[in-house]
């Protein structure tokens, strides 16, 4: 059986895979950070609003997309 690389997958599959990881971060922020009061340990974190951490996760996932897409 051959291994399928990330670059060989259809665009919709790649997008869905990375979107699910982003939504996992959002769920973690909602259910763990917000509900347990851990936001006091994270500078610039805003409960219930978009904060720099969402942009950081999106940038990391975009960089991962680029690296994995160029991989042969």
Image (tube, helix red, strand yellow):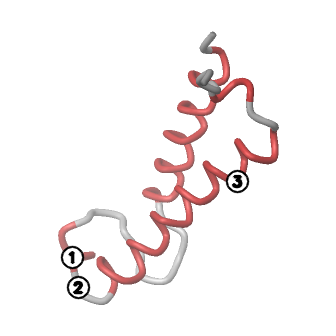
Q: Position of residue 19 (x, y in %)?
A: 64, 56
Q: Which part of the image, by quadrant, shows the N terminus? A: top right
Quarter holding the C terminus? Answer: top right
Residue beneath disc 2: 37
Q: In terms of secondary structure, where does tag 3 sit?
A: helix
Residue 6 versus residue 13 in the image, above or below: above
- Image marks 3 and 1: residues in contact by CB distance under 8 Å: no
Residue 35 lies, with reference to residue 64, above or below; the image says below
Q: Nearer the viewer, residue 62 or 49?
A: 62
Looking at the image, is mark 2 or mark 1 nearer the viewer? Answer: 2
The residue lying toward the viewer, choosing from 5 and 57, is 5
Earlier residue among tags 3 and 1: 3
Q: Which of the two discs, 3 and 1, sits closer to the camera?
A: 3
Compared to residue 35, the image places residue 55 above or below, namely above
SS label for mark 1: helix
- Identify the mark at residue 40; answer none if there is no mark: 1
User: Which residue: 74% across, 25% down?
Assistant: 8
Left or right position of 33 against 52: left
Q: Which residue is mark 3?
A: 16
As drawn, which residue projects farthest toward the left? 41
Q: Residue at x 42, y 81 (%)?
A: 30
């Amino acid at each position: 059986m051959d291994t399928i690389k990330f670059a060989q997958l259809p665009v919709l599959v790649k997008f869905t895979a990375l979107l699910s990881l982003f939504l996992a971060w959002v769920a973690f922020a909602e259910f763990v950070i917000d509900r347990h009061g851990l936001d006091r340990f994270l500078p610039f974190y805003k409960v219930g609003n978009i904060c720099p951490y969402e942009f950081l996760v999106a940038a990391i996932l975009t960089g991962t997309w680029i690296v994995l897409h160029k991989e042969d």
